[in-house]
Image (cartoon, helix red, strand yellow):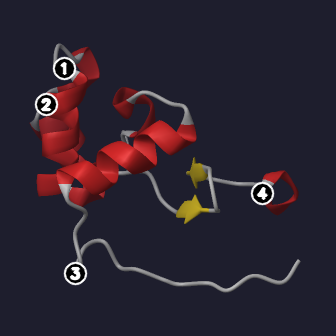
Amino acid sequence: MNADIEKRDFFRDPFSEAELTKIIKMTGKKPSEILRKRDKKYKELGLENNKKTDTQLIKLMVKHPGLILRPIIITKNKAYIGKIDAKNLK
């Protein structure tokens, strides 16, 4: 498979809320499903007993990018987050 790849360090170049919302929609998952549970902010913010709305979670992920599972791979019309088998990319 031949693909143009554009890399982005979202720690240096953070997502906007709108961007992250769009990416999450493209994954077909809920914001809570792409939280990186091993990040220390996850525990500090008490996210294991999450009572936050999707919007609140997205705001937190924008503010603390370490909470976002990595990597994020975006194809034309779909996004994949976390450990990905290359065979599943379309």
Tag 4 secondary structure: loop
Q: Are marks 3 and 1 in contact (CB under 8 Å)?
A: no
Rendered residue at 50%/30% (across/down): 29
Q: Are marks 2 and 4 in contact (CB under 8 Å)?
A: no
Q: Give me the disc on residue 12.
A: 3
Closer to the camera, 64 or 26?
Answer: 26
Instruction: Report how far apart the C-alphas of labels 2 and 1 lie in the structure.
Output: 5 Å
Residue 51 on image: x %, y %: 17, 13
Rendered residue at 24%/59% (across/down): 65
Task: Pick whichever of labels 3 and 4 is earlier in the sequence.
Answer: 3
* Residue receiving disc 4: 89
Closer to the camera, 74 or 76?
Answer: 76
Residue 51 is left or right of residue 81, and the answer is: left
Amino acid at circle 3: Arg
Q: Are marks 4 and 1 in contact (CB under 8 Å)?
A: no
Q: Residues within 10 Å of mark 1 (few under 14, many from 20)?
A: few
Q: Are marks 3 and 4 in contact (CB under 8 Å)?
A: no
User: Taking the image as drawn, is residue 60 in sight?
Assistant: yes
Figure check: 43 above or below 82: above
Task: Pick whichever of labels 2 and 4 is earlier in the sequence.
Answer: 2
Q: Residues within 10 Å of mark 2 (few under 14, many from 20)?
A: few
Amino acid at circle 2: Gln
* Residue receiving disc 1: 53
Amino acid at circle 4: Leu
Rendered residue at 84%/84% (across/down): 2
Of marks 3 and 4, the one in the foreground: 4
Instruction: Report how far apart the C-alphas of labels 2 and 4 lie in the structure.
Output: 29 Å
* Residue receiving disc 2: 56
Figure check: 45 above or below 82: above
Q: Are marks 2 and 1 in contact (CB under 8 Å)?
A: yes
Instruction: Report how far apart the C-alphas of labels 4 and 1 lie in the structure.
Output: 29 Å
